Image (cartoon, rainbow, N blue to C red):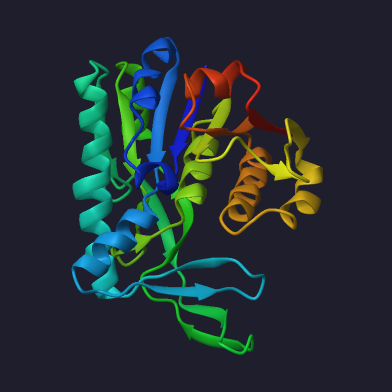
């Protein structure tokens, strides 16, 4: 089985759970690729460095980071220099072979720079701004990923892409994971977060189909709504199953595959 695991920034910023790292061992029979987020850590360290992060809100209400050149420098340092290496180190310490890199390496992930962005101002009026160093994934080259998988090594990928002008671009980590999963024709995309799954009316939605997601997405908070958008895209691009699960429970990956505390989204 081919599995892409996206480790969310909400999990990483609190310290990568040891139970999550240890739970990779029972899955070694599968081909596993990791894509990580880390926005909260980037924000925290950016402020420590005196670079105040900027955020924008789309007309649909989705909040995201605005990345200019200064912010991009911090983003690269934290995502690749700290978060990626921390995950690789934790896996290797547990005798799980892993190799870390970003989408720039190879290049592995290509993206088109967003020239302009339509955002809401403080009065909820639409305005057009420069797109900065933000990109939309256009292609994933699986050459290096597949070579690592064939050798039993877990590739750990930071969500930074190469633009058509050979610039580094900040790409959404959920979209990066969905794109990697689709390019690999993965059986499962597991999104590890800090909640048990989709919460609707106070309860976890255990199973949903892609056509139900649009209705559900209006009832979940910021962050989870983006996951649902990209989960649906991944299913449409060939991924067989999406799982949203909690990284702080006992045996989180085994639970994501076979447990009860999770949401499974099917096409």
Instruction: Mark yes or no: residue 240 visible.
Output: no
110 relative to 208, above or below: below
Whether residue 13 is visible, yes or no, is: yes
Figure quadrant of residue 85: top left
Does 206 sit left or right of 177 as displayed? right
Q: Give the image location of residue 108, x and y in percent.
A: 34, 44
| Quarter of the picture holding the C terminus | top right
Identify which residue, 173 or 43, lies in the foreground: 43
Left or right placement of residue 105 versus residue 63 in this view: left
> Residue 197: image x %, image y %?
63, 37
Q: Is residue 156 above or below residue 165?
A: above
Name the residue: 28% across, 35% down: 87
Q: Residue at x 61, y 90 (%)?
A: 123
Residue at 35% across, 19% down: 22
In which image quadrant can residue 115 be found? bottom left
User: Which percent across, then down, holds residue 30?
Assistant: 45, 15
Closer to us: 32 or 61: 61
Closer to the camera in the image, 92 or 203: 203
Determine whether, in the image, residue 76 is placed left or right of residue 254: left
Q: 193 and 126: which one is in front?
A: 193
Give the residue at x 74% y 58%.
218
């Amino acid at each position: 089985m081919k599995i892409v695991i996206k480790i969310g920034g909400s999990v990483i910023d609190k310290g990568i759970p040891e139970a999550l790292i240890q739970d990779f061992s029972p899955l070694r029979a599968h081909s596993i690729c990791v894509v990580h987020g880390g926005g909260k850590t980037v924000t925290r360290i950016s402020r420590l460095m005196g670079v105040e992060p900027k955020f924008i809100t789309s007309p649909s209400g989705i909040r995201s980071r605005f990345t200019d050149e200064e912010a991009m420098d911090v983003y690269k340092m934290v995502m690749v220099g700290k978060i990626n290496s921390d995950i690789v180190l934790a896996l290797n310490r547990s005798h799980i072979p892993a190799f870390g890199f970003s989408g720039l390496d190879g290049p592995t992930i290509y993206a088109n720079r967003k020239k302009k962005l339509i955002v809401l101002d403080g009065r909820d009026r639409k305005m057009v701004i420069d797109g900065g160093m933000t990109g939309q994934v256009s292609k994933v080259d699986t050459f290096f990923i597949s070579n690592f998988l064939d050798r039993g090594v877990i590739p750990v990928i930071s969500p930074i892409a190469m633009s058509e002008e050979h610039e580094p671009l900040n790409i959404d980590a959920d979209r990066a994971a969905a794109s990697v999963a689709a390019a690999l024709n993965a059986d499962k995309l597991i999104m590890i977060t800090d909640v048990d799954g989709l919460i609707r009316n106070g309860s976890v939605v255990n199973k949903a189909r892609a056509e139900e997601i649009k209705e559900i997405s209006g009832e979940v908070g910021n962050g989870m709504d983006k996951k649902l958008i990209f989960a649906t895209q991944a299913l449409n691009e060939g991924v067989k199953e999406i799982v949203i699960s909690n990284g702080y429970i006992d045996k989180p990956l085994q639970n994501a595959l076979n447990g009860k505390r999770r949401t499974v989204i099917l096409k």
